Amino acid sequence: MPEGHAKPHEIPLPGASLDQLFRTARSYNAFEPEALPNALLHEMYELTKWGPTASNGNPARFVFLVSPEAKARLAPHMSSSNRPKTLAAPVNVIIAYDLDFWKLTPQLFPHKPEAGSWFSSSPEAAFESALRNGSLQAAYLMMAARSLGLDCGPMSGFKPDGVNAEFFKDISWRANFICNIGYGTTENLFGRLPRLPFDQACQVL
């Protein structure tokens, strides 16, 4: 495409794709027991990484727990209601963010490598950007999983300090939330809950 020329309009996704990603997608509590191949986890991340983040900071970090030993390390830090389904899910993802993400600025933002100083001089700014943009990337990961035919069960019922001590001792990563991923079943699946209508959640000024 010549520089300065308008980009051709994309064709909207078909309704079935929008259903899979949004309208009929659910938060699953139970999954088929089959393991997910590592190649599928790689494919999920390869889609996730293209989502935008501020200054291309890419602060999210994803720890995929697939072995019984890894799950056993996580289980004590889950709430009592979340522990059984976490142990049973094919994959648990510790979705984290790196407080030192800015150290990779020369690699990820090469046209302005000095931008890392915005965060190296302010731990508060680094935390805010890491949490905000890491959460964006967490949503991208869930959309990537759904686009590949998988289902997700995101959870905030866990002890972050315990997870950080167990998995991230002496490094700059911090847990945001946990997400189970696999092929969902209808076991313990709740009915669809309401959502806010446009006029209640939005303004057009």
Image (cartoon, rainbow, N blue to C red):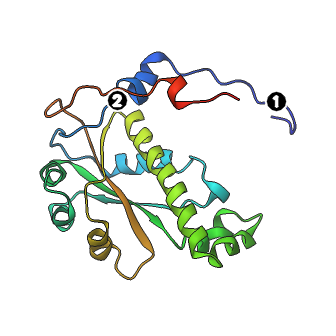
Q: Which of 138/126 is in front? A: 126
Q: Position of residue 160 (x, y in %)?
A: 31, 66
Label annotation for residue 155: none
Whether 204 is drawn above or below 144: the answer is above
Three-letter residue code for mark 1: Ala
The vertical placement of 120 against 158, above or below, is below
* Left or right: 72 as drawn, with respect to 62: left
Relative to 13, 62 lies left or right:
left
- Give the percent coordinates (x, y) of residue 30: 17, 39
User: Quick one: which residue is furthest to the top in this view?
Assistant: 15
Q: Amino acid at mark 2?
A: Ala
- Residue 25, numbered circle: 2
Is 188 rendered above or below residue 9?
below
Residue 27 percent location from the top left of the image:
29, 37
Looking at the image, residue 136 sits to the left or right of residue 169; the answer is: right
Query: Is disc 2 placed on a helix, strand or loop?
Result: loop
Instruction: Quadrant for the C terminus, please.
Output: top right
Residue 6: mark: 1
Q: Count residues near mark 2 (Cα–Cα under 10 Å), then give few for <14, some for 14-19, many for 20+.
A: some
Give the position of the N terminus as an image quadrant: top right
Q: Residue furthest front?
A: 200
Q: Indicate which disc, 2 or 1, sits on the residue closer to the N terminus.
A: 1
| Residue positioned 76% across, 66% down in the render | 112
Name which quarter of the figure residue 196 lies in. Answer: top left
Could you tell me how far apart the alpha carbons at marks 2 and 1 are, in whole angstroms?
34 Å
